């Protein structure tokens, strides 16, 4: 492979020597230090070999009695350039394209941000643009570590970021900072409220005045334990404490899902048709002479071929014919899958499932399954005391913790 490349660069001439003693040319080449390769005998009076252009010119000047040198073939870059020396554009266009591509590849022409929400992406885009990551920026001047450090330091909502330069695209990956949990300091007065609707199954109060008891029905947001200590004696002031408790509710969660009795499945037939074209902004130019699709059902797959510094891109759209097949749904299997999904959702909410029941309602084309789960969940969210509500319920003389 390496020798073939060298031969193409230097140029190769295939020479045929005819005469009574064609081997004489081999002796001359050996004495002159000329390298011959691919030497072979064609017949009793003809041999052929390959040499470089310079060696061919040197052998042509040598006079061998009774022999003649004939050029059978020649190839390589020197031969190609000499043959097309008048076609200057043919060589300039590829050279210009290579130079332009090499220069343009040193810049960033596209910035992509993934992760976080839209507001955070806009903040990060403005920040990294000020730090040098923008359209037309030189890649070698971008310091990923410094940009990451300054962005995380100055943007409060940002917990993690990285800038990855791939080709002419700067891919920025970000992660939003998780909000701080609403924890009330232990020295601040608070109440304990319910986070769900349900029946109080178990209740243990560490500090505070319980307002409900086990077996009571409570609503979401209702105060279960208060940190307000109020005396019936008007001369004793009201005190405020940080209420804490361990409370478990019993509740029922329901979810209904619709399962169709038949499932539509597409089976490819193996036939396909491709359409080529170019798209500039919102305009498409179709290169295919016949782009009409005769398939009744098909899958459409589109691939883009683009250079980021060009304002247009080429595309290839493939249409694959498919047969639509209606198959019966395995109702039992689908119910099992939906059941697992429902239980996973309850587990993510921190609920412990005690009992799960199902109710089926069959229709002509579908089956409706209603899941009903008897659950247990802890509900002891602490919130700051609302002094206005507390004062409206009775007279207070002080705010002591």
Image: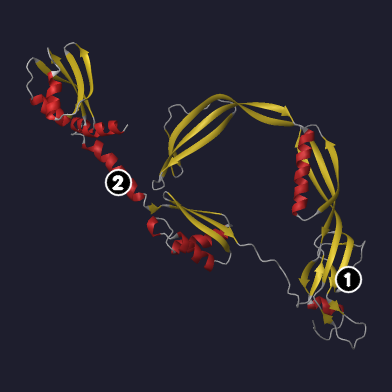
Residue placed most toward the observer, 359 or 275: 359
Residue at 81% x, 76% y: name it.
Answer: 389
The residue at 24%/31% (across/down) is 7
Q: Position of residue 2 (x, y in %)?
A: 30, 34
The answer to whether residue 349 is left or right of residue 230 is left
Look at the picture and state if 205 lies above or below 355: below
Q: Is residue 269 left or right of residue 330?
A: left
Whether 3 is drawn above or below 233: the answer is above
Measuring 81% from the left and 65% from the top, which residue is drawn there? 380
What colouring does the structure picture have? secondary structure
Q: Please give the residue where the numbered disc 1 appears in the rendered image.
A: 210
In the displayed structure image, the side of residue 54 where residue 247 appears, left or right: right
Q: Residues within 10 Å of mark 2 (few under 14, many from 20)?
A: few
Residue at the outermost top position: 44
Q: Which residue is mark 2?
A: 99
| Residue 137 appears in the rendering | no
Q: Where 112 falls versus 91 (above or below)?
A: below
**SS at mark 1 in the image:** strand
Q: Position of residue 73 (x, y in %)?
A: 21, 22
Measured in 3D between alpha carbons, the distance from the residue under mark 2 to the one under mark 1, in whole angstroms, is 80 Å
Q: Residue furthest bottom?
A: 235
- Which x, y percent locates residue 70? 14, 19
Residue 85 numbered mark, or none: none
Number of other residues with Cα within 10 Å of mark 1, as a class: few under 14, some 14 to 19, many 20 or more? some
Residue 84: x and y in percent read 20, 32
Q: Would residue 395 be found to the left or right of residue 110 on screen? A: right
- The local secondary structure at tag 2 comes to helix
User: What residue is shown at x 45% (from left), y 37% (from top)?
Assistant: 315
Which part of the image, by quadrant, shows the N terminus?
top left
């Amino acid at each position: 492979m390496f020798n073939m490349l060298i031969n193409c660069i230097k140029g190769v001439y295939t020479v045929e020597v005819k005469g009574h003693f064609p081997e004489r040319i081999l002796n001359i080449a050996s004495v002159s230090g000329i390298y011959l390769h691919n030497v072979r005998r064609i017949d009793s009076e003809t041999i052929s070999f390959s040499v470089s252009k310079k060696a061919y010119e040197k052998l042509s000047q040598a006079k061998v009695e009774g022999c003649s040198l004939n050029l059978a073939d020649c190839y390589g870059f020197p031969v190609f350039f000499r043959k097309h020396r008048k076609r200057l554009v043919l060589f300039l266009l590829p050279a210009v394209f290579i130079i332009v591509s090499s220069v343009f590849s040193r810049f960033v022409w596209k910035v992509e941000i993934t992760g976080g929400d839209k507001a955070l992406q806009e903040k990060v885009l403005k920040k990294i643009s000020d730090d040098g990551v923008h359209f037309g920026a030189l890649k070698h001047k971008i310091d990923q570590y410094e940009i990451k450090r300054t962005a995380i330091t100055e943007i409060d909502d940002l917990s993690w970021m990285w800038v990855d330069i791939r080709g002419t695209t700067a891919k920025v990956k970000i992660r939003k900072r998780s909000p701080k949990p609403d924890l009330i300091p232990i020295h601040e007065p608070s109440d304990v409220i319910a986070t769900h609707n349900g029946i109080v199954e178990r209740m243990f109060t560490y500090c505070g005045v319980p307002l409900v008891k086990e077996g009571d029905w409570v609503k979401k947001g209702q105060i279960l334990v208060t940190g307000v200590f109020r005396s019936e004696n008007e001369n004793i002031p009201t005190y405020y404490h940080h209420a804490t408790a361990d409370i478990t509710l019993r509740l029922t969660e329901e979810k209904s899902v619709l399962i169709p009795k038949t499932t539509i499945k597409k089976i490819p037939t193996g036939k396909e048709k491709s359409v080529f074209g170019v798209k500039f902004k919102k305009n498409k130019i179709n290169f295919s002479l016949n782009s009409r699709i005769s398939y009744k059902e098909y899958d459409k797959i589109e691939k883009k071929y683009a250079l980021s510094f060009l304002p247009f891109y080429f595309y290839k759209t493939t249409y694959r014919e498919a047969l639509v097949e209606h198959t019966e749904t395995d109702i039992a299997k689908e119910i099992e899958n939906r059941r697992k999904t429902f239980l996973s959702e309850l587990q993510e909410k921190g609920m412990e499932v005690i009992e799960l029941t199902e109710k089926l309602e069959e229709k002509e084309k579908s089956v409706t399954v209603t899941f009903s789960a008897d659950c247990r969940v802890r509900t002891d969210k602490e919130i700051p005391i609302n002094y206005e509500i507390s004062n409206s319920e009775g007279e207070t003389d002080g705010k002591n913790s």
